[in-house]
Amino acid sequence: MARDIIARLKDQAATPGRIWLQGDAPVTYADLLAETGRMANALRQFGLVKGDRLLLQVDKCEAVLALYLACLRAGVVFLPVNPGYTVAETMHFLTDADPALAVVDGARVGEIVDKCRKSIGLTDFLETVSQAQEGFSDPVSMPDDLAAILYTSGTTGRSKGVMLSRENLASNAEALVGLWRFTAEDVLLHVLPVFHTHGLFVATNCVLYAGASMIFQRSFAPEAVLAALTETTVMMGVPTFYSRLLADARLTPAACAHVRLFISGSAPLSPATHAEWRARTGHVILERYGMTETNMITSNPYDGPRKAGTVGLPLPGVSVRIAGPEGQPVAAGEAGAIEVMGPNVFGGYWRMPEQTAKEFRDGWFVTGDLGAFDADGYLSILGRAKDLVITGGLNVYPAEVEAAIDDLPGIAASAVIGVPHPDFGEAVVACVVGPVDPEAIRAGLRDRLAGFKIPKRVLVLTELPRNAMGKVQKAELRRVYADLF
Ligand code: AMP
């Protein structure tokens, strides 16, 4: 068993002066422990007991991380929600998770009052916290206790509540800290959202587990990021952060000289961006793969080769297999469904036992992603299973076509989808961004891809629809172009 996150917090707080948040008024781990104590007492004052859910829907701020840890201390289940969701969208989480308390940005209180048991504005909540005692006696916790529920983005169908245990979080933090060589000397630049596993758990728990510190920025702005890099040793980002920084002339080797590690995840990093980053900065981005249900699954190595277009090797203690449609093993190197088992894998979907049962096969979680291992054991992601294009009976993996397109001159981004076609069942369609000629792209792909993989149509768009993590919303593209043929 990995050491619990709260036990690690207390370890760090025992080192006098150890910094959690950098800045003009640095916050130490001892300050953080005291604040989480006050918050945990405030949660008790609001009547929350072990197992109750706390829904948090606020803009990114430092208090989110403290409240996450306070919930862990009190045994309250932390349920962060994207502040971009409308009240109607948020209703699903309120009715499904039945939180005992919702803490929301001020303006929201009126909108969701009566729709849940109790709600309060963040400012008022923090006022109560400031009056509370810092001494808190943590109830006994077990590794399997529920720590958090994170809802999947649910682009198709109902969004599902992913139940994560304390051990899920702790085991993943322990593995990543070792793999990525985090120490108390590290300074992580935190520019990710805090309602999603990447910014909330991967970034925060690695820092806390190692006793490192972070520079906490409330949103991604290239100028502020470039300024902070001079004090940063590790940056975690989604691929769009990297492509946006590449568009800034101030990105130079000197600007990155203090950084030891750039990590990318949550969406595919194109080999073109990987290569460009290396040429511009001298750094080889380390790409990793994970999902809300499993935490992190694979990572490129710290010391060994970091292969562009792959997500590396399974984390220590995590097993990954590639399976055929019925769960049967596939031949070495062949594509199939990515399935995962290990202490990182969630316990199930909140109040959805049938759905949970459907997504596990013989104890393996079926990720819904397709992939293949190379001869060195590196995994490549070939796309979501539901994004696979079957054209004239042949499988086309979108990731392969996107990588070939991204290699052509002038392409800023691409997304390959399948749309209904009268002859082929589905036709491969490429949506691209950049100053490009569709026919030149098709011609440019001819010596790179077999004919059936070449898009029947190339659509030039001004931008691709993306979610908060920079992930392209392919279901949306399929909906818009459903009648193309
Ligand atoms: P989420 O649960 O929002 O974190 O989304 C998880 C999904 O993001 C995975 O199932 C993958 O489809 C995708 N994903 C995450 N990391 C990567 C990566 N490095 N390359 C390609 N896809 C990724």
Image (cartoon, rainbow, N blue to C red):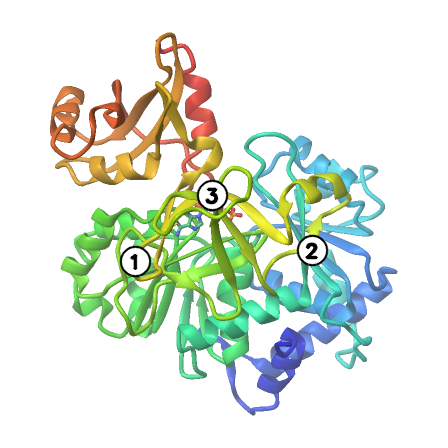
**Residue 468 in picture, x, y percent from top left:** 47, 43
**Which residue position is annotated with label 1?**
375
- Residue 153 shown left or right of residue 386 in the figure: right
Q: Secondary structure at mark 3?
A: strand
Q: Earlier in the sequence, mark 2 or mark 1?
A: 2
**Dot 2 amino acid type:** Gly
**Which residue position is annotated with label 2?**
347
**Dot 3 amino acid type:** Asp
Say few, some or many: other residues with alpha carbon within 10 Å of mark 3 (under 14 / 14 to 19 / 20 or more). some
Label 2 vs label 1: CA separation?
Answer: 32 Å
State whether residue 16 is above or below residue 114: below
**Which residue position is annotated with label 3?**
369
- Residue 220 shown left or right of residue 229 in the figure: right
Residue 352 showing in the rendered view: no
Residue at horizontal 84 percent and vertical 66 percent from the top: 44
State whether residue 86 is above or below residue 394: below
Q: Secondary structure at mark 2?
A: loop
**Residue 101 in picture, x, y percent from top left:** 79, 52
Q: Secondary structure at mark 1?
A: loop
Quarter location, residue 477: top left
- Residue 298 shown left or right of residue 132 in the figure: left
In the rendered view of the protein, which quadrant contains the N terminus?
bottom right
Q: Earlier in the sequence, mark 3 or mark 2?
A: 2
Q: Nearer the viewer, residue 471 or 47?
A: 471
Number of callouts: 3
Of badges 2 and 1, the one in the foreground is 1
Of badges 3 and 1, the one in the foreground is 1
Are dots 3 and 1 in contact, CB under 8 Å?
no
Say few, some or many: other residues with alpha carbon within 10 Å of mark 1 (under 14 / 14 to 19 / 20 or more). few
**Residue 21 in picture, x, y percent from top left:** 50, 73
Disc 3 CB within 8 Å of nearest ligand 1 atom:
yes
